[in-house]
Image: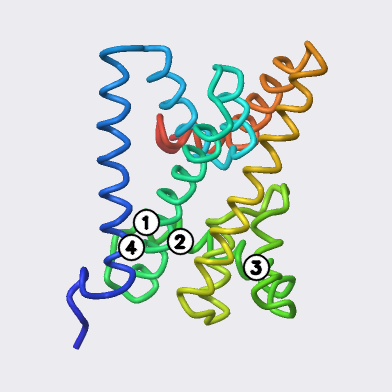
Amino acid sequence: MKQKLFYTNEGRILLTGILLSLLLLIVIGYFATIDIEIAKTLGLTFFVHSFGGRAAGIGLCIMNGFGPVVTIVYNFYLEALIVCFTYSIFVLTTNNYIKVIWVTNLIERLTQKAVEQKDKVESYGWIGLFLFVMLPLPVTGPVMGSVIGYMLKVNLFKNFSATGSGTFAAIVVWFFCFDFLEQRFHVIQYVFAGIVILALLSRRKAIIKFFFGKKS
């Protein structure tokens, strides 16, 4: 007999993701009443993170005058929020708690990508998972890393500690690289804009499907 959804670890993680999302909406709503530009930046940064644009999100924060602490903490917060949803939905769908066709199709595609990458991580254990999440490559990142960790039967603490620390390290490296360039080269805003555009173009199919559905 199955446990009730929110009695499972994955159910609790999903609940955490919901609470983090509500808090994010409250914060964006608050800034919308006092400084609409900050609210726009927060919302757009979340949008690009949702489609895998970690570097683009950091660049947006820097371009809009966010300091190092705010930029690093906010971008890490967004990555944690997204992982809470994707990891929990992946596991709950795999274990037949969630039976929604379009979700199942998304999870199947995610599984295929994870299977292609997991051999690269398995031999190196925790450090392999950490480096996989940290490296700025198209198929890397905390979402894929946490799924691979689950597939390799890494316990939840090691899985999330590796993906969390890898994400934090990547965000810190991206921030200081961008900050270094910004202080020395006036063209850095164009670099940021290019990264945002590339991030959106690389996910153009997912974005089009998200807003307009499948083509008839």
Measured Cα–Cα span from mark 2 to mark 3 = 20 Å
Residue 211: x %, y % from top left: 40, 30
Measured Cα–Cα span from mark 1 to mark 3 = 25 Å
Q: Name the residue under label 4.
A: 13
- Give the number of the mark in front: 4 or 1: 4
Q: Mark 3 points at which residue?
A: 129
Which image quadrant: the C terminus?
top left
For image coordinates 67% across by 78% down, the residue present is 125
- Give the number of the mark in front: 1 or 3: 3
Residue 97: x %, y % from top left: 27, 71
Mark 4, residues whose alpha carbon is within 10 Å: few (<14), some, or many (≥20)? many
Query: In what element is the residue under mark 4?
Result: helix
For image coordinates 27% across by 65% down, the residue present is 12
Taking the image as shown, residue 57 lies to the left or right of residue 180, namely left
Give the numbered dot on residue 107.
Answer: 2
Q: Earlier in the sequence, mark 2 or mark 3?
A: 2
Asked whether the beta carbons under mark 1 and mark 2 sit within 8 Å of each other, the answer is yes
- Give the number of the mark in front: 2 or 3: 3
Note whether 204 is above or below 131 in the view shown.
above
- Give the number of the mark in front: 4 or 2: 4
Q: Earlier in the sequence, mark 4 or mark 1?
A: 4
Q: Which of marks 4 and 2 is nearer the N terminus?
A: 4
Q: Earlier in the sequence, mark 4 or mark 3?
A: 4
Measured Cα–Cα span from mark 4 to mark 1 = 17 Å
- Which residue is most to the bottom? 1
Asked where in the image residue 57 lies, by quadrant, the reply is top right
Give the numbered dot on residue 103.
Answer: 1
Note whether 113 is above or below 96 in the view shown.
above
Q: Earlier in the sequence, mark 1 or mark 3?
A: 1
What amino acid type is highlighted by mark number 2? Ile
